Structures are given as structure tokens and as C-alpha cells.
Image (cartoon, rainbow, N blue to C red):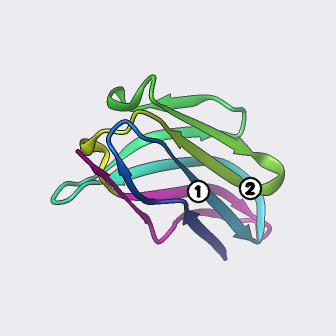
Amino acid sequence: QVQVVESGGGLVQAGGSLRLSCAASGSIMRLSYMGWYLQAPGKQRDMVADINIGGMTNYADSVKGRFTISRDNAKNTVYLQMNNLKPEDTGVYYCNARGLTTGPAGFGSWGQGTQVTVSS
């Protein structure tokens, strides 16, 4: 079983910065993918940024140039540095982790989410 835990959310004024962290733990043999998703109020959950085991990254157009995703493979942890935050960045940020357990078996796990609120 794999657990995913996010941290680092909070309340910030527009133009400010936050850094989110997500740690995966458990019987992980290979962590192939980690990504951050935003569920804004009344909207579906959408990908914000993701990174694979080789370090290749993808970003939603709305955050390019403002957000940076990075990972520490030794710690099974991914970070999301969010700069120049805007009110439309408000919502719950979820972390998703995918890979192989020591079973081996494939897994895909979500964290419980962390709230980010950007005031104007």
C-alpha cells in the first residue's frame, strides 16, 4: 500500500508565493510519475504540473512561467514552487503518484489535498 501526503498550502495575497510538498511512502519499488492537480471550487480536477522519473515536466498553460515542479527521487517527494500567485489559483491541490510496488503491482494513489487560497 502506498500513502501520499501533501503539505504547504495556506492563505496568500495575490503576487505572493507558496511551496507545496508531497511525499509518497510504503512498499514502493518504482515511482514513475508524480503530479499536482487543482480542483477549484465548482470545477473538475485538472493537472497543473507533473514530472516523470526521468525529470521530464509538463505544465498547464495557465501556470507556465510561474510554477516549477521538482522531485527528490531519494525521498520519493515532489515539490511545487508557486510564484506570482493569482486568485484563480485558489482551490485544493492534490498530489498523484503512480508506479510499481514491491509486489510487484502497479499503483496510483492520491493524497488528501491541501488548500491554497489566494486573495486579491
Residue at 34% across, 26% down = 61
Instruction: State the image quarter where residue 116 is shown.
Output: bottom left
In the image, residue 117 above or below residue 68: below
Q: Secondary structure at mark 2?
A: loop
Residue 105: x, y in percent?
A: 68, 65
Circles 1 and 2: CB atoms closer than 8 Å: yes
> Is residue 26 part of the magenta span, yes or no?
no
Residue 97 marker: 1
Labels 1 and 2: the sequence-earlier one:
2
Image location of residue 118, percent across then percent down: 31, 50
Query: What's the residue at 84%, 51% (across, down)?
Result: 74
Amino acid carrying label 1: it is Ala
Badge 2: how crowded within 10 Å, few (<14), some, or many (20+)?
some
Q: Farthest residue to the bottom: give it.
A: 1
In screen coordinates, is 26 left or right of 50? right
Point 19% across, 54% down: residue: 43
- Residue 102 place in picture, x, y as percent: 80, 67
- How busy is the neighbourhood of tag 1: few (under 14 within 10 Å), some, or many (20 plus)? many
Which quadrant, please, contains the C terminus?
Answer: top left
Query: In the rendered structure, does residue 94 fall within the stretch colored magenta?
Result: yes
Split into 4 quadrants, where in the image is the N terminus?
bottom right
Q: What type of secondary structure mainly makes up the magenta span? A: strand
Q: Which residue is mark 2?
A: 76
Chain part drawn in magenta:
92-120
Identify residue type, mark 2.
Answer: Asn
Seen at 77% across and 71% down, the residue is 27
Q: Nearer the viewer, residue 120 or 75?
A: 120
Q: Under tag 1, what secondary structure?
A: strand
The quadrant holding residue 25 is: bottom right
Q: Is residue 26 left or right of residue 48?
A: right
Residue 32 located left or right of residue 27: left
Q: CA distance from mark 1 to mark 2?
A: 9 Å
